[in-house]
Amino acid sequence: MKMAETKYDNRETGCCARLDEARWDNQEFVWKDKPFVKDHIREFLHLPLNFGSVMARDHAALEKAQAYAEEPLWLVDEVSPWGSDVYLATDREVPNMRMEHLSGTFMTKVFTGPYGDIGQWVKQMEAHVKEHGRTLQKLYFFYATCPKCAKQFGKNQVVAFARVE
């Protein structure tokens, strides 16, 4: 489907939608082979250098293929200080794009604050998972708003997605 046909309502900014906290905070999702376009972002000490151009390229491919998931979502895997993998949810295979399928149980938690708080968020998410008697396997982040839209909304929100056992 095209972006305009999804649940993503970005009319307020023309860029990012407001995050529906109730939809994402303290939730559990079970995915089996959920399709994603996978790409890579270059970074310098975890500061993205080409996030905007990667997202623009990937969104253009999803729009052209009319392959947006009903509920658009992009997850970032901070693989090193020099780069991150980004996963954009789709509803099908996207031609000429690298695809990845994610499976597992994912616990979520919404965090509000500057990006620099990510270290605290990681610790809080680790504790959250442990409190629920689960083991953290992998941690992804859904950066719900760009810096410009976060400023307009008056807050920056990030959703941690913990794949758990």
Image (cartoon, rainbow, N blue to C red):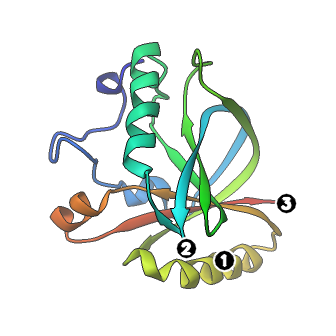
Residue 148, horizontal then vertical, whole percent: 22, 60
Numbered circle sitting on residue 128: 1
Q: Amino acid at mark 1?
A: His
Q: Amino acid at mark 2?
A: Leu
Q: CA distance from mark 2 to mark 1?
A: 26 Å
Closer to the camera in the image, 42 or 158: 42
State which tag comes first along the sequence, 3 or 1.
1
Identity of the residue drawn at 39% across and 42% down? 53
Q: Are marks 3 and 2 in contact (CB under 8 Å)?
A: no
Residue 147 sits above or below residue 53 on the image: below
Please state if 135 lies on the left or on the right of 117 as rendered.
right
Q: Secondary structure at mark 1?
A: helix
Please state if 140 lies on the left or on the right of 113 as rendered.
right
Q: Secondary structure at mark 2?
A: loop
Image quarter (top left, top right, bottom left or bottom right) of the N terminus: top left
Q: CA distance from mark 3 to mark 1?
A: 13 Å
Q: CA distance from mark 3 to mark 2?
A: 30 Å
Q: Which residue is mark 2?
A: 45
Residue 35 sits above or below residue 146 on the image: above
Image quarter (top left, top right, bottom left or bottom right) of the C terminus: bottom right
Residue 103, horizontal then vertical, whole percent: 77, 41
Residue 133 sits above or below residue 17 on the image: below
Residue 72, horizontal then vertical, whole percent: 45, 37
Identity of the residue drawn at 54% across and 51% down? 41
Q: Which residue is mark 3?
A: 165
Q: Which quadrant of the structure image shows residue 122?
A: bottom right
Numbered circle sitting on residue 87: none
Please state if 105 lies on the left or on the right of 66 as rendered.
right
Disc tally is 3
State which tag comes first along the sequence, 2 or 1.
2
Q: Amino acid at mark 3?
A: Glu
Residue 159 sits above or below residue 32 on the image: below
